[in-house]
C-alpha cells in the first residue's frame, strides 16, 4: 500500500490547491489558486517541498489520520491543532507517526489554513497545475472537495529537519482588515462623495463582510457607493484580476477572488497583490476598509513581500 493520509473530518470545506493554474485566462479558465499564497510558500519552505499540492481547509473540526511516517506543517489561519493529544506550534513543521491523528479544534485568528506534507501528494497535474477547479470539476482530488474517508497518497514521504517560521513573519489576520487598493478603470463612475468615503484611510463607517462569500468573491455590507446619474450601472463584460473590487447596481462592493476571468460590473478598485492573501481570512462580520495607494507604492510593497518569501529565515528545533 502506498504511503497515505486518510481524511476523517473535512471541516466545512477542504480542497487540494497550489499557486494556480496560470496562463489560461484567455480561454476562460481561472487560476483557482490557493487564496493565501504567502501561507503556501511558507509551507514549501518549512517542508523543503516547493511546487507541491497542499490542503486548503475552511472551518475547525478538521481531522486526518497518518497512514505513514511523514513530516507535516500547518500555516495560514492561527489554529489550535493537536497531533493525538499533543498541541502543535503554529507555522512550524512536525513529525507524524503511522496511525497518529491530526485534529484542528479551533481557529483563533483568520479563516482558512493550509496543511502540507514533505514530498507532497501523489496527484496528476491538469493544465499544468494540481489545484481544484470546482466549477468545471477537474484537478485536485476528482475535481471536488474532500470528504471523510478519502485516501490521499503521498508522493515521497520525507523527514526534513523540523523548522519554525519566526512569529514576527506570521501576518495579522484579525478584523479590521486594511486592504490597500489602486484605482480601477471605472472609478470615475461614482460620485466624488462616495469615492471620498471609499478611499478614506480612517473611515468612520467601515464595510463589513457579509455571509455571502466563497472562493469566487466576497460581498460587502455598508454604505453603498452612488453612481453618477449619467453613467450605466453595468459594463460590457471585460477581464478582471483577482482582487478586483466590482460595484453592482446596489452600490455594495464585491471583491473578486480566483474563480472568474471576466465581469460585468464597474471596477472601482483592485486590491494590490501584496494584500491579496489577506482576502483568504475575511470572515462574515469582519470589518474592512480600503486605502488607495499609487501604482509605484503597490509595486514596492509586492517587491518587499516577494523578497521576504524568497528568503524565509527559518529556525530549527
Image (cartoon, rainbow, N blue to C red):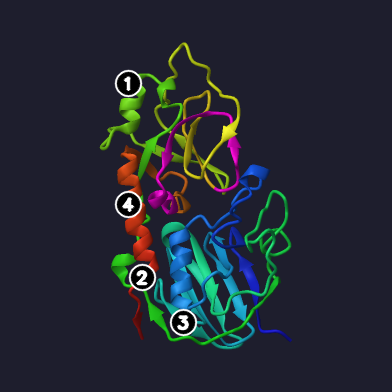
Single out the mark in the foreground, 2 or 1. 2
Which residue is identified by label 1?
A: 193
- In the image, residue 11 sits, relative to residue 135, either above or below, namely below
Q: Is residue 263 shown in magenta?
A: yes
Q: Secondary structure at mark 1?
A: helix
**What quarter of the picture does the N terminus occupy?**
bottom right
- The span picked out in magenta is 258-278
Q: CA distance from mark 4 to mark 3?
A: 32 Å
Mark 3 falls on what kind of element? strand
Question: Mark 4 — residue?
Answer: 301
Contact between labelled residues 1 and 4, with CB atoms less than 8 Å apart: no
**Residue 238, percent from left and from top:** 58, 32
Residue 311 bears which disc, if any?
Answer: 2
**3D distance between C-alphas at marks 2 and 4:** 16 Å
Q: Mark 2 or mark 3: which is in front?
A: 2
- Per the model, the C-alpha gap separating discs 2 and 3 is 21 Å
Q: Secondary structure at mark 2?
A: loop
Amino acid at each position: 500500500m502506498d504511503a497515505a493520509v486518510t481524511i476523517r473530518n473535512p471541516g466545512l470545506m477542504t480542497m487540494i490547491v497550489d499557486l494556480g493554474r496560470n496562463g489560461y485566462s484567455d480561454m476562460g479558465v481561472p487560476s483557482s489558486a490557493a487564496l493565501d499564497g504567502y501561507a503556501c510558500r511558507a509551507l514549501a519552505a518549512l517542508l523543503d517541498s516547493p511546487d507541491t499540492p497542499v490542503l486548503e481547509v475552511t472551518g475547525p473540526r478538521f481531522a486526518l489520520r497518518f497512514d505513514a511516517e511523514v513530516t507535516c506543517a500547518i500555516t495560514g489561519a492561527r489554529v489550535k491543532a493537536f497531533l493525538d493529544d499533543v498541541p502543535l506550534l503554529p507555522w512550524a513543521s512536525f513529525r507524524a507517526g503511522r496511525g497518529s491523528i491530526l485534529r484542528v479544534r479551533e481557529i483563533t485568528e483568520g479563516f482558512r489554513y493550509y496543511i502540507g506534507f514533505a514530498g507532497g501528494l501523489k496527484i496528476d497535474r491538469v493544465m499544468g497545475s494540481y489545484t481544484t477547479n470546482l466549477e468545471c470539476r477537474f484537478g485536485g482530488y476528482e475535481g471536488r472537495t474532500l470528504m471523510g474517508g478519502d485516501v490521499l497518497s503521498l508522493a515521497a514521504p520525507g523527514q526534513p529537519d523540523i523548522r519554525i517560521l519566526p512569529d514576527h513573519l506570521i501576518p495579522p489576520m484579525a478584523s479590521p482588515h486594511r486592504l490597500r487598493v489602486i484605482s480601477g478603470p471605472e472609478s470615475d463612475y461614482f460620485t466624488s462623495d462616495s469615492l471620498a468615503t471609499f478611499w478614506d484611510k480612517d473611515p468612520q463607517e467601515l464595510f463589513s463582510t457579509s455571509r455571502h462569500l466563497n472562493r469566487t468573491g466576497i460581498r460587502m455590507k455598508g454604505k453603498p457607493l452612488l453612481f453618477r446619474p449619467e453613467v450605466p450601472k453595468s459594463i460590457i463584460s471585460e477581464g478582471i484580476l483577482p482582487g478586483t473590487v466590482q460595484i453592482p447596481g446596489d452600490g455594495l462592493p464585491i471583491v473578486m477572488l480566483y474563480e472568474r476571468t471576466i465581469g460585468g460590473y464597474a471596477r472601482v478598485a483592485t486590491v494590490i497583490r501584496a494584500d491579496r492573501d489577506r482576502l483568504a481570512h475575511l470572515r462574515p462580520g469582519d470589518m474592512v476598509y480600503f486605502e488607495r495607494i499609487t501604482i509605484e507604492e503597490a509595486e514596492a510593497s509586492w517587491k518587499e513581500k516577494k523578497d521576504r518569501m524568497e528568503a524565509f529565515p527559518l529556525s530549527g528545533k
